Image (cartoon, rainbow, N blue to C red):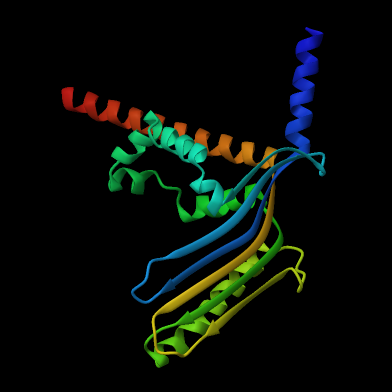
């Protein structure tokens, strides 16, 4: 009994003092006119205990994705029953079961992600100068609104963005992202629990409604 309590205490301690840190050291997306999309990334995911101790980490970059062992693991994941079942789902089902805007906002609020660093650079060009001059301020305003919503402790050296119009009369976009996000494990578990609870309640309501409809038809 004491051993069980001790184990539960350790698990509780780990859950409440651990967090996930996602370090996007480089995420470059580039698309030129009549060329393939270029993607370069270097991402590190860490499970951190008591703010400093890294229990587990995973490095994702262009090289690791091309690694044969990683490829085998990804293939196995893609061949699981869950993924195959997800591929069979139709658009209507996905649309009906996707979280609503209010739910998404609630999930983000409950996750309480901390953006320790958020640097975004965008270079954009469109073969229509007037439209390019019109769209760039709109994009800048949208990004600034997003920054205001998600960045809590603003630091001009760590949180900034830049949208640069090129005016070279071609269709081109390039994005550079440098970002560090941390989330507490307890918040993630809480969000998952609430999400599954709501889904279960929704499914139960649907079953009850179907039973009533069936009873009325037979009555």
Along the line of sight, which residue is nearer the eye, 151 or 74?
74
Along the line of sight, which residue is nearer the eye, 63 or 112?
63
* Picture quarter with the N terminus: top right
Horizontal placement of 206 versus 124: left or right?
left
166 above or below 11?
Answer: below
In this view, which residue lies farthest toward the bottom?
130
In this view, which residue lies farthest toward the top?
1
85 above or below 163?
Answer: above
* Picture quarter with the C terminus: top left
Along the line of sight, which residue is nearer the eye, 40 or 139?
40
| Residue 56 point in image, percent of width and height | 70, 37
Q: Residue at x 76, y 74 (%)?
A: 156
Q: Quadrant of residue 23?
A: bottom right
| Residue 15 point in image, percent of width and height | 73, 33
Q: Residue at x 72, y 42 (%)?
A: 19
| Residue 132 point in image, percent of width and height | 44, 87
74 above or below 159?
Answer: above
In this view, which residue lies farthest toward the front?
68
Q: Quadrant of residue 7?
A: top right
- Count the numbered circles shown: 0
Q: Residue at x 64, y 48 (%)?
A: 111
Q: Quadrant of residue 187?
A: top right
Horizontal placement of 34 versus 122: left or right?
left
| Residue 39 point in image, percent of width and height | 49, 62
191 above or below 4?
Answer: below
């Amino acid at each position: 009994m004491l051993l069980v309590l001790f184990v539960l205490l350790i698990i509780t301690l780990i859950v409440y003092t651990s967090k996930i840190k996602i370090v996007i050291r480089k995420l470059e997306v580039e698309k030129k006119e009549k060329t393939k999309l270029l993607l370069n990334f270097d991402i590190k995911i860490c499970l951190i205990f008591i703010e400093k101790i890294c229990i587990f980490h995973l490095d994702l970059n262009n090289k690791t994705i091309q690694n044969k062992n990683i490829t085998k693991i990804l293939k196995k994941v893609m061949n699981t029953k869950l993924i195959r079942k997800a591929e069979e789902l139709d658009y209507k089902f996905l649309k009906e079961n996707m979280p609503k805007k209010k739910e998404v906002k609630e999930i983000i609020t409950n996750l309480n992600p901390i953006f320790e660093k958020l640097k975004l650079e965008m270079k954009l060009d469109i073969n229509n100068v007037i439209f390019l001059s019109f769209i760039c301020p709109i994009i800048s305003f949208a990004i600034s609104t997003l920054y205001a919503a998600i960045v809590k402790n603003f630091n001009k050296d760590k949180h900034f963005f830049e949208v640069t119009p090129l005016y070279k009369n071609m269709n081109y976009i390039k994005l550079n992202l440098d970002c560090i996000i941390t989330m507490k494990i307890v918040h993630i578990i809480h969000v998952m629990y609430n999400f599954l609870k709501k889904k279960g309640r929704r499914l139960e309501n649907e079953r009850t409604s179907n039973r009533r409809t069936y009873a009325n038809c037979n009555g």
